[in-house]
């Protein structure tokens, strides 16, 4: 079973869904592929707006909905993260490099790494473009932080390719799960994805 999970490390909805995604990924195992991407690049190719460019009414609703959804998930949510939106490339490179290293048997909790990076933005107000912040999250997830430096060029290529893969797969937002012909958009569709895949999610 191959499941592709497209996401932006800057997305608050990715953060809100990350604990459930970790459960799903753990059950799928090696077939689960994290595909971090540059959402602004994807939106530009599709002629869509990113939230920072949305109209005031949509932004106001967005703020209300984030508070509600974070509360349901039991997660802290900052009203105005000081480093949002951060340059998503360095943290995304780290995830890609860590996934490649894990494929080769390196120790580390990949799901915890993804959650830790998203939490850093929305729950902790940290700058995920900062090398020291990334290194601390990697170390806290059991990865050697040097993996990010060693895999940087490979990760940069894959990060750019993920946008192309997303467009080819019909991805238009994040988080987005592609499992064969089945597609699921949004953290509020994770339960549907789990049911489709025959997975069990613990009650939040």
Image (tube, rainbow, N blue to C red):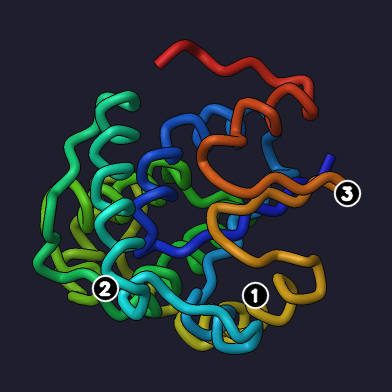
Q: Residues within 10 Å of mark 2 (few under 14, many from 20)?
A: some
> Residue at horizontal 13%, vertical 52%?
79
Residue at mark 3 to residue at mark 1: CA–CA distance: 17 Å
**Residue 198's spot in the image, x, y percent?**
78, 20
Give the camera-side residue of 202 and 103.
202
127 with respect to 22 (left or right): left
Report the front residue among 188 and 112.
188
The residue where tag 3 is placed is 180
Q: CA distance from mark 2 to mark 1?
A: 19 Å
Where disc 3 sits, the SS reads loop
Tag 3 or tag 2, which sits nearer the N-term?
A: 2
Q: Which residue is mark 2?
A: 85
Find residue 174 and report its horizontal and vertical position in percent. 54, 58
Q: Are marks 3 and 1 in contact (CB under 8 Å)?
A: no
Q: In the rendered structure, which disc, 2 or 1, sits on the residue that comes first in sequence?
A: 2
The percent coordinates of residue 16 (x first, y second) are 37, 40
- Relative vertical location of residue 202 with respect to residue 46 in this rendering, above or below: above
Give the answer, above or below, for where 27 lies relative to 176: above
Res. 194 image quadrant: top right
Q: Residue at x 16, y 69 (%)?
A: 127
Q: Which residue is mark 1?
A: 162
C-alpha span from label 2 to label 3? 31 Å
């Amino acid at each position: 079973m191959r499941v592709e999970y497209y996401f932006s490390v800057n997305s608050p909805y990715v953060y809100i869904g990350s604990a459930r995604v970790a459960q799903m990924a753990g059950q799928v195992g090696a077939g689960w592929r994290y595909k971090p991407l540059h959402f602004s690049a994807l939106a530009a190719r599709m002629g869509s707006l990113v939230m920072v460019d949305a109209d005031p009414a949509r932004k106001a609703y967005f703020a209300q909905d984030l508070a509600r959804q974070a509360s349901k998930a039991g997660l802290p949510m900052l009203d105005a993260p000081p480093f949002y939106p951060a340059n998503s490339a360095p943290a995304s490179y780290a995830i890609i490099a860590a996934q490649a290293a894990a494929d080769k048997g390196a120790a580390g909790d990949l799901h915890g790494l993804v959650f830790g990076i998203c939490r850093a933005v929305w729950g902790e107000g940290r700058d995920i473009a900062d090398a020291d912040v990334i290194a601390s999250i990697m170390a806290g997830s059991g990865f050697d932080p040097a993996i990010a430096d060693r895999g940087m060029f490979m990760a940069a290529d894959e990060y750019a390719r993920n946008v192309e893969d997303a467009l080819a797969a019909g991805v238009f937002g994040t988080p987005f799960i592609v499992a064969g012909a089945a597609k699921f958009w949004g953290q509020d569709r994770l339960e549907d994805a789990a049911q489709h895949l025959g997975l069990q999610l613990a009650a939040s």
